[in-house]
Amino acid sequence: MAVKISPSVLTADFLELKKDIAKLESAGTDMLHLDVMDGIFVPNISFGVPIIKSIKNHTSIPLDVHLMIDRPDRYIKQFAEVSDILGFHCEAGSDVEKTLKMIKEFGCKACLTIKPCTPAEKIFDYLPLCDMVLVMSVEPGFGGQKFMPQALEKITALRNEIDRRGLKTDIEVDGGINAETAPLAVKAGANVLVAGSYVFSSDDMGKTVKEIKAL
C-alpha cells in the first residue's frame, strides 16, 4: 500500500501559505491537512470555513479537514462544502454513526478520529462507514508535540481489524511525524502520514515531502 502524505498547515506561516502550497503540489503531496479547533473540544482556536474555502480556491490538492470541535454534527454541511475528506472525533459528543453517514450524504469521504486515551476497539463497529480513520499520536490542539509510541499498538489493532473485515479503509496518523517516527507508523499499518512542523520548518519542503513518502 503506497504511503500518502498530508502536511498540516497548523504550523505554517499563513502569509506564505499560497507559495508553500504550490511547493507542496509540485512535490506530489497527496492531501492537505487542515485542523479546525474551537477552543472547547481542544484548548486552542484555529480557523473555520472561510479560510478553508480560500485554500480550496487556490489548490487542486484534496483537503483533509480534521474537526476538533464540540458536537461536530452541527456543522457538517458547512464544512462538507469545502472539504474532500471530513473527519471528526468519536469523543466530541455527536452520534458517530449518524455523523459519518451525514458526511457521506454531503459527498465527502468520512474519517473518524481517536485521541491518545481512546482504545482502537471503540471504533471497530464504525469501520465499514469510514473511508479513513485517524489515530492521534499527540494530544490534539497544538502542533510540534512529541510522538506517543503507544499509538503504534492502536494503528496495528486497526490495521488487523480492517484487513480481517476486508475493508479498504486508510489509516492516518497525526502528531510528531518525522524521519524517525514515520517508518514506525508505516510498519505498524498506517498509510497516511500527517506532518506539520517537520515539513513547514524544513529548508526545502518539497524535498522533505518526497523523503517522507519514500520511507
Image (cartoon, rainbow, N blue to C red):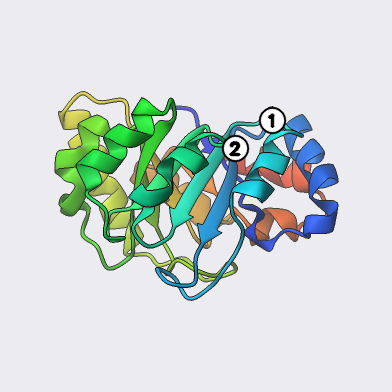
Q: Residue at x 32, y 31 (%)?
A: 169
Marks 1 and 2: which is nearer the front? 1
Residue 38 coordinates in the image, percent (x, y): 49, 65
Residue 80 coordinates in the image, percent (x, y): 48, 36
Mark drawn on residue 213: 2
Residue 49 coordinates in the image, percent (x, y): 59, 48
Disc 1 residue crowd, few under 14, some 14–19, many 20+, Cα 10 Å = some
Between 69 and 6, the one lying in front of the other is 69
Between 98 and 120, the one lying in front of the other is 98
Q: Name the residue under label 1.
A: 28
Determine the CA span between mark 1 and mark 2: 9 Å
Q: Residue at x 22, y 53 (%)?
A: 120
Left or right: where does residue 69 sit relative to residue 168? right
Badge 1 marks a residue whose secondary structure is loop
Q: Please say if 184 is above or below 129.
A: below
Q: In terms of sequence position, does the residue under pointer 1 or pointer 2 come before the other?
A: 1
Disc 2 residue crowd, few under 14, some 14–19, many 20+, Cα 10 Å = many
Residue contact at pointers 1 and 2, CB within 8 angstroms: yes
Q: Residue at x 59, y 36 (%)?
A: 31
Left or right: where does residue 179 sit relative to residue 1? right
Q: Which amino acid does label 2 sit on?
A: Lys
> Farthest residue in the bottom direction?
43
Q: Please say if 141 is above or below 160.
A: below
